[in-house]
């Protein structure tokens, strides 16, 4: 069955053809909405969400196609129309839970990796998956590096591997100090966060050795990292509701700082995901408290705090122009299988129509004299 033809998952038009929706700006009223679930931010709900915990969300760099990966072993693809409706298009399977995803730079393929220790390339035009990477333990993170046409994969086997997807063996393998927990790339900057709070900073002009090796400035386990779009630094998020703003060059270390977030009085929640806005350079954090916040690191301000959802937010992603922020409301397994959230079976994806006021940088607040 070719990608986009009617089938068990979704249906509708062929790949690249618009979803059946009227023209207009994203956020126009939708004629139908899926069965309602708690939606405190009044965002668009994606119909036919994954059946298990949602582990990653990734947007095509050329069109409004959204990929979601899940612990049920599936990779799901949706087409998002201007009216906020997301049409299921197709899906592919792994032989274990899927943990990460990314797109090729031309939007023709999706890369995914997970607990089957493999990464696969899903050719969307032919609806064909091909194995393109292999590790000795689950692949926790991956990213497609368009500047060098290589796929980077970080694994719990304590290695970072780069793959020419046409070859069966890695183009380069780099040993990590511990298991890979987080990875982010803004060429030539690549940042890896591992177990035991190690941070590895790589200059991809010389990828064999880390440009810097350091301990996270945060006292607790690293959950996520995000490279600055201008390549001058990176963000680190931890399980202790804290984010570190770090700069690569020694001359800029005075600009480093940390801040608290995703907390309610004495309750502290993990920062599960951080993503930069593609045009403004501001960023969003998603937390285990069920909240996502927009921030400006340069003026050290929170731009907007959104309403609390009824479960954790494990992941989120901006689309290519930053007009939509997709986020999952789904158990993140941080409290094990006995937690009531694990038993609820609620897994949903929402699409937030981003407002300029939520992501546009603001000047730093001027403190008055006493």
Image: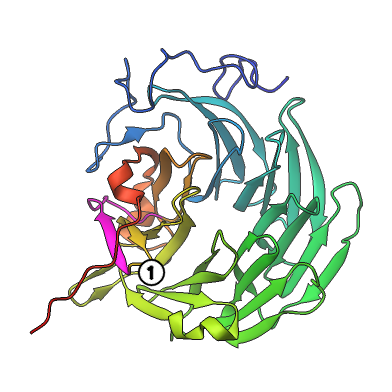
Query: Is there any visible trace of residue 102 in the rendered image?
Result: yes
Where is residue 238? Give x, y as percent. 44, 74
Q: Is residue 22 left or right of residue 19?
A: left
Q: Is residue 107 left or right of residue 295?
A: right
User: Which corner quadrant holds the C terminus?
Assistant: bottom left
Please report the residue visible at 60 percent of the width from the left and 65 percent of the height from the top: 231
User: Outermost residue, left direction?
Assistant: 370
User: Which corner quadrant holds the N terminus?
Assistant: top right
User: Outermost residue, front direction?
Assistant: 369
Q: Which residues are magenta?
A: 300-313
| Res 250 quadrant in image | bottom right
The residue nearer to you, when weighing 23 against 59, is 23
Magenta span includes 312: yes
The residue nearer to you, when weighing 130 against 274, is 274
Local crowd at mark 1 within 10 Å, few (<14), some, or many (≥20)? many
Magenta span includes 263: no
The residue nearer to you, when weighing 125 against 54, is 125
Where is residue 107? Give x, y as percent. 67, 35
Dominant SS type (magenta): loop
Query: Is there any visible trace of residue 333 in the rendered image?
Result: no
Q: Secondary structure at mark 1?
A: loop
Provide the residue designation for mark 1: 270
Please tell me whether residue 9 is drawn above or below residue 231 in the rendered image: above
Please tell me whether residue 256 is drawn above or below residue 45 in the rendered image: below
Where is residue 147? Give x, y as percent. 76, 52
Q: Is residue 333 left or right of residue 192?
A: left
Where is residue 251? Give x, y as percent. 56, 85
| Res 259 quadrant in image | bottom left
Please tell me whether residue 140 is drawn above or below residue 82 in the rendered image: below
């Amino acid at each position: 069955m070719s990608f986009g033809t009617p089938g068990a998952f979704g249906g509708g038009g062929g790949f690249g053809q618009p979803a059946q929706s009227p023209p207009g700006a994203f956020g126009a009223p939708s004629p139908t909405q899926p069965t309602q679930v708690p939606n405190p931010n009044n965002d668009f709900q994606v119909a036919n969400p994954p059946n298990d915990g949602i582990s990653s969300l990734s947007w095509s760099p050329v069109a409004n196609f959204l990929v979601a990966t899940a612990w049920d072993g599936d990779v799901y693809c949706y087409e998002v129309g201007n009216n906020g409706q997301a049409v299921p298009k197709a899906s592919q399977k792994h032989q274990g839970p899927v943990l990460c995803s990314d797109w090729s730079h031309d939007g023709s393929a999706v890369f995914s990796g997970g607990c089957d220790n493999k990464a696969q390339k899903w050719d969307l035009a032919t609806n064909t998956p091909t194995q393109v990477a292999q590790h000795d333990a689950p692949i926790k993170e991956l990213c497609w590096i368009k500047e060098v046409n290589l796929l980077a994969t970080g694994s719990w086997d304590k290695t970072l591997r780069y793959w020419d997807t046409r070859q069966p063996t890695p183009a380069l393998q780099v040993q990590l100090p511990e298991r890979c927990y987080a990875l982010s790339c803004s060429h030539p900057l690549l940042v890896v966060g591992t177990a035991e709070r190690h941070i590895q900073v790589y200059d991809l002009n010389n990828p064999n050795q880390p440009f810097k090796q350091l301990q996270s400035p945060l006292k607790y386990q690293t959950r996520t990292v995000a490279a600055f779009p201008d390549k001058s630094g990176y963000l680190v998020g931890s399980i202790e509701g804290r984010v570190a703003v770090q700069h690569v060059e020694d001359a800029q270390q005075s600009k480093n700082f940390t801040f608290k977030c995703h907390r309610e009085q004495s309750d502290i929640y993990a920062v599960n995901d951080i993503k930069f806005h593609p045009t403004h350079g501001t960023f969003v954090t998603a937390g285990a408290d069920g909240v996502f916040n927009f921030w400006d690191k340069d003026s050290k301000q929170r731009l907007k705090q959104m309403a609390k959802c009824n479960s954790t937010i494990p992941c989120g992603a901006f689309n290519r122009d930053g007009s939509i922020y997709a986020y999952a409301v789904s158990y993140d397994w941080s409290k094990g299988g006995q937690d009531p959230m694990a038993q609820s079976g609620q897994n949903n994806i929402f699409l937030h129509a981003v407002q300029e006021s939520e992501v546009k940088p603001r000047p730093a607040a001027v403190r008055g004299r006493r």
